[in-house]
Amino acid sequence: HEGGHALVGFALPAADPVHKATIIPRGRSLGHTLSLPTEDRVHMRRSEMVDKLAMMLGGRTAEELVFADPTTGATNDIKQATDLARRMVMEWGMSDRLGPMKYGEPQGEVFLGRDYTHQRDFSDEVASIIDEEVRKLITRAHDESRAILSTHREALDRLATALIERETLDEDEIREVLADVPKWEHAPNGTMRIREPNGVKPEGLAASLSEEHRSE
Protein backbone atom coordinates (compact mmCIF):
# COMPACT_ATOMS: atom_id res chain seq x y z
CA HIS A 1 0.00 0.00 0.00
CA GLU A 2 2.61 2.57 1.04
CA GLY A 3 4.87 1.47 -1.78
CA GLY A 4 2.07 2.25 -4.21
CA HIS A 5 1.72 5.79 -2.88
CA ALA A 6 5.48 6.35 -2.97
CA LEU A 7 6.06 4.95 -6.45
CA VAL A 8 3.20 6.86 -8.08
CA GLY A 9 4.26 10.06 -6.33
CA PHE A 10 7.87 9.54 -7.37
CA ALA A 11 6.99 8.90 -11.02
CA LEU A 12 4.56 11.79 -11.57
CA PRO A 13 6.32 15.02 -12.58
CA ALA A 14 3.89 17.47 -10.95
CA ALA A 15 3.43 15.61 -7.65
CA ASP A 16 5.15 16.86 -4.50
CA PRO A 17 8.41 14.99 -3.79
CA VAL A 18 7.98 11.95 -1.57
CA HIS A 19 9.71 12.81 1.72
CA LYS A 20 9.14 9.59 3.67
CA ALA A 21 7.33 6.26 3.55
CA THR A 22 6.82 4.08 6.61
CA ILE A 23 4.92 0.96 7.61
CA ILE A 24 5.19 1.72 11.32
CA PRO A 25 1.60 1.92 12.71
CA ARG A 26 0.41 5.22 14.15
CA GLY A 27 -3.05 5.39 15.69
CA ARG A 28 -5.51 3.67 13.37
CA SER A 29 -3.10 3.98 10.45
CA LEU A 30 -0.82 1.03 9.63
CA GLY A 31 1.63 3.34 7.89
CA HIS A 32 1.83 6.52 5.84
CA THR A 33 3.61 8.20 2.96
CA LEU A 34 4.54 11.85 3.32
CA SER A 35 5.04 14.18 0.35
CA LEU A 36 6.13 17.79 0.78
CA PRO A 37 6.38 20.73 -1.64
CA THR A 38 9.85 22.06 -2.37
CA GLU A 39 8.79 25.62 -1.57
CA ASP A 40 5.97 27.59 0.04
CA ARG A 41 3.08 28.29 -2.29
CA VAL A 42 -0.34 29.88 -2.21
CA HIS A 43 -1.81 28.39 -5.39
CA MET A 44 -1.72 24.95 -7.00
CA ARG A 45 -1.88 24.21 -10.73
CA ARG A 46 -4.43 21.79 -12.14
CA SER A 47 -1.63 19.45 -13.23
CA GLU A 48 -0.37 19.31 -9.65
CA MET A 49 -3.79 18.38 -8.34
CA VAL A 50 -4.33 15.75 -11.03
CA ASP A 51 -1.02 14.11 -10.07
CA LYS A 52 -1.94 14.43 -6.39
CA LEU A 53 -5.17 12.51 -7.05
CA ALA A 54 -3.23 9.67 -8.68
CA MET A 55 -0.79 9.52 -5.78
CA MET A 56 -3.65 9.45 -3.26
CA LEU A 57 -5.07 6.40 -5.04
CA GLY A 58 -1.69 4.70 -5.41
CA GLY A 59 -2.07 2.66 -2.22
CA ARG A 60 -5.49 1.26 -3.08
CA THR A 61 -4.39 0.56 -6.65
CA ALA A 62 -1.31 -1.33 -5.45
CA GLU A 63 -3.53 -3.54 -3.30
CA GLU A 64 -5.74 -4.28 -6.31
CA LEU A 65 -2.75 -5.02 -8.54
CA VAL A 66 -0.86 -7.26 -6.12
CA PHE A 67 -3.61 -8.97 -4.14
CA ALA A 68 -6.73 -8.50 -6.32
CA ASP A 69 -8.63 -8.13 -3.02
CA PRO A 70 -8.33 -4.57 -1.63
CA THR A 71 -8.78 -3.76 2.05
CA THR A 72 -10.44 -0.91 3.93
CA GLY A 73 -7.02 0.66 4.47
CA ALA A 74 -7.62 3.22 1.72
CA THR A 75 -10.72 4.72 3.36
CA ASN A 76 -9.08 8.05 4.16
CA ASP A 77 -7.24 8.16 0.81
CA ILE A 78 -10.52 7.73 -1.09
CA LYS A 79 -12.23 10.41 1.00
CA GLN A 80 -9.42 12.92 0.46
CA ALA A 81 -9.26 12.22 -3.27
CA THR A 82 -13.03 12.59 -3.66
CA ASP A 83 -13.04 15.83 -1.67
CA LEU A 84 -10.21 17.26 -3.78
CA ALA A 85 -11.85 16.26 -7.06
CA ARG A 86 -15.16 17.79 -5.96
CA ARG A 87 -13.49 21.07 -5.02
CA MET A 88 -11.70 21.12 -8.39
CA VAL A 89 -15.07 20.90 -10.12
CA MET A 90 -17.27 23.00 -7.81
CA GLU A 91 -14.93 25.70 -6.50
CA TRP A 92 -11.98 26.09 -8.84
CA GLY A 93 -13.62 25.79 -12.25
CA MET A 94 -11.40 22.92 -13.41
CA SER A 95 -14.04 21.03 -15.37
CA ASP A 96 -13.99 21.66 -19.12
CA ARG A 97 -17.63 20.66 -19.32
CA LEU A 98 -18.89 23.02 -16.62
CA GLY A 99 -16.39 25.80 -17.20
CA PRO A 100 -14.95 28.37 -14.77
CA MET A 101 -17.98 28.67 -12.52
CA LYS A 102 -18.49 28.16 -8.80
CA TYR A 103 -21.28 25.84 -7.71
CA GLY A 104 -22.75 25.93 -4.21
CA GLU A 105 -21.97 28.03 -1.15
CA PRO A 106 -19.92 26.66 1.74
CA GLN A 107 -22.08 25.73 4.70
CA GLY A 108 -20.93 24.64 8.15
CA GLU A 109 -17.81 25.41 10.17
CA VAL A 110 -15.21 22.82 11.13
CA PHE A 111 -14.76 24.28 14.62
CA LEU A 112 -18.47 23.78 15.25
CA GLY A 113 -18.07 20.09 14.59
CA ARG A 114 -20.03 20.12 11.35
CA ASP A 115 -18.95 18.84 7.96
CA TYR A 116 -17.71 21.31 5.38
CA THR A 117 -20.45 21.00 2.76
CA HIS A 118 -22.11 23.16 0.12
CA GLN A 119 -25.53 24.79 0.13
CA ARG A 120 -27.06 23.74 -3.15
CA ASP A 121 -27.91 26.49 -5.62
CA PHE A 122 -28.01 24.52 -8.86
CA SER A 123 -30.37 22.20 -10.71
CA ASP A 124 -30.59 18.42 -10.59
CA GLU A 125 -29.14 18.34 -14.10
CA VAL A 126 -26.07 20.31 -13.02
CA ALA A 127 -25.72 18.15 -9.89
CA SER A 128 -25.63 15.07 -12.13
CA ILE A 129 -22.95 16.64 -14.32
CA ILE A 130 -20.89 17.56 -11.24
CA ASP A 131 -21.02 13.93 -10.10
CA GLU A 132 -19.96 12.77 -13.57
CA GLU A 133 -17.03 15.20 -13.67
CA VAL A 134 -15.86 14.20 -10.19
CA ARG A 135 -16.10 10.54 -11.14
CA LYS A 136 -14.15 11.24 -14.33
CA LEU A 137 -11.27 12.83 -12.39
CA ILE A 138 -11.16 9.94 -9.92
CA THR A 139 -11.37 7.29 -12.65
CA ARG A 140 -8.59 8.87 -14.69
CA ALA A 141 -6.38 9.15 -11.59
CA HIS A 142 -7.07 5.51 -10.73
CA ASP A 143 -6.30 4.39 -14.30
CA GLU A 144 -3.06 6.38 -14.41
CA SER A 145 -1.99 5.04 -11.03
CA ARG A 146 -2.60 1.49 -12.27
CA ALA A 147 -0.67 2.15 -15.49
CA ILE A 148 2.36 3.41 -13.55
CA LEU A 149 2.35 0.56 -11.06
CA SER A 150 1.83 -2.07 -13.77
CA THR A 151 4.65 -0.65 -15.87
CA HIS A 152 7.02 -0.53 -12.91
CA ARG A 153 5.85 -3.62 -11.04
CA GLU A 154 9.41 -4.76 -10.35
CA ALA A 155 10.19 -1.37 -8.77
CA LEU A 156 7.05 -1.67 -6.64
CA ASP A 157 8.22 -5.05 -5.36
CA ARG A 158 11.70 -3.65 -4.61
CA LEU A 159 10.17 -0.79 -2.69
CA ALA A 160 7.91 -3.13 -0.71
CA THR A 161 10.91 -5.33 0.14
CA ALA A 162 12.90 -2.30 1.30
CA LEU A 163 10.00 -1.15 3.51
CA ILE A 164 9.69 -4.60 5.09
CA GLU A 165 13.42 -4.65 5.80
CA ARG A 166 13.79 -1.07 7.08
CA GLU A 167 10.20 -0.12 8.03
CA THR A 168 10.90 3.54 7.19
CA LEU A 169 12.54 5.01 4.08
CA ASP A 170 13.54 8.66 3.74
CA GLU A 171 13.62 10.65 0.52
CA ASP A 172 17.18 9.66 -0.44
CA GLU A 173 16.52 5.96 0.19
CA ILE A 174 13.32 6.05 -1.89
CA ARG A 175 15.19 7.78 -4.70
CA GLU A 176 17.89 5.11 -4.54
CA VAL A 177 15.44 2.21 -4.71
CA LEU A 178 13.58 3.84 -7.62
CA ALA A 179 16.66 5.06 -9.48
CA ASP A 180 15.62 3.36 -12.73
CA VAL A 181 12.04 4.71 -12.73
CA PRO A 182 11.64 7.57 -15.26
CA LYS A 183 9.21 10.43 -14.92
CA TRP A 184 5.76 9.65 -16.29
CA GLU A 185 4.38 11.92 -19.00
CA HIS A 186 0.89 12.77 -20.22
CA ALA A 187 0.47 12.72 -23.99
CA PRO A 188 -1.55 15.56 -25.60
CA ASN A 189 -4.38 13.18 -26.56
CA GLY A 190 -4.87 12.09 -22.96
CA THR A 191 -2.98 8.81 -23.24
CA MET A 192 0.20 8.16 -21.31
CA ARG A 193 3.75 7.79 -22.56
CA ILE A 194 6.97 7.05 -20.74
CA ARG A 195 10.18 9.03 -20.95
CA GLU A 196 13.18 6.88 -21.74
CA PRO A 197 15.24 6.20 -18.60
CA ASN A 198 18.45 7.16 -20.50
CA GLY A 199 20.20 3.95 -19.56
CA VAL A 200 19.88 4.56 -15.84
CA LYS A 201 20.36 1.36 -13.89
CA PRO A 202 19.70 0.79 -10.20
CA GLU A 203 22.72 0.91 -7.96
CA GLY A 204 23.46 0.14 -4.33
CA LEU A 205 20.35 -0.79 -2.38
CA ALA A 206 18.18 -0.72 -5.51
CA ALA A 207 20.48 -3.12 -7.37
CA SER A 208 20.64 -5.60 -4.51
CA LEU A 209 16.86 -5.57 -4.04
CA SER A 210 16.33 -6.01 -7.77
CA GLU A 211 18.71 -8.96 -7.84
CA GLU A 212 16.97 -10.57 -4.87
CA HIS A 213 13.59 -10.16 -6.58
CA ARG A 214 14.84 -11.82 -9.77
CA SER A 215 16.29 -14.76 -7.87
CA GLU A 216 13.01 -15.56 -6.07
Image: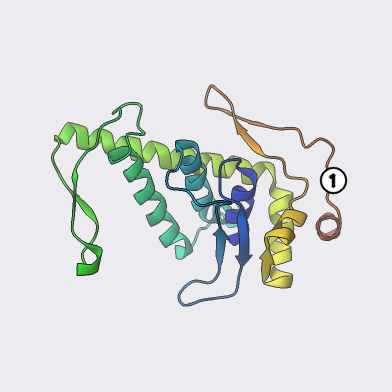
Q: Say above or below: 69 vs 118.
A: below
Q: Quadrant of the C terminus?
A: bottom right
- Please state the horizontal and vertical placement of residue 174, each as a whole percent of the image: 70, 58
The residue under the point 55% across, 52% down is 37
Mark 1 Cα shell of 10 Å, populated few (<14), some (14-19), many (≥20)? few
- Is residue 195 toward the left or the right of residue 80 in the image? right
- The image quadrant of residue 20 is bottom right
- Please state the horizontal and vertical placement of residue 94, each as a whole percent of the image: 36, 34
- Please state the horizontal and vertical placement of residue 202, each as a whole percent of the image: 83, 50
- Is residue 135 toward the left or the right of residue 117 in the image? right
For the image, the number of numbered tags is: 1
The residue under the point 61% across, 55% down is 18
Q: Nearer the viewer, residue 210 or 55?
A: 55
The disc labelled 1 sits on which kind of residue? Lys
The residue under the point 56% across, 41% down is 14
Picture colour scheme: rainbow
Q: Secondary structure at mark 1?
A: loop
Q: Say above or below: 196 vs 27.
A: above
The residue under the point 37% across, 56% down is 79
Q: Say above or below: 189 vs 86.
A: above
**According to the image, label 1 marks what residue?**
201
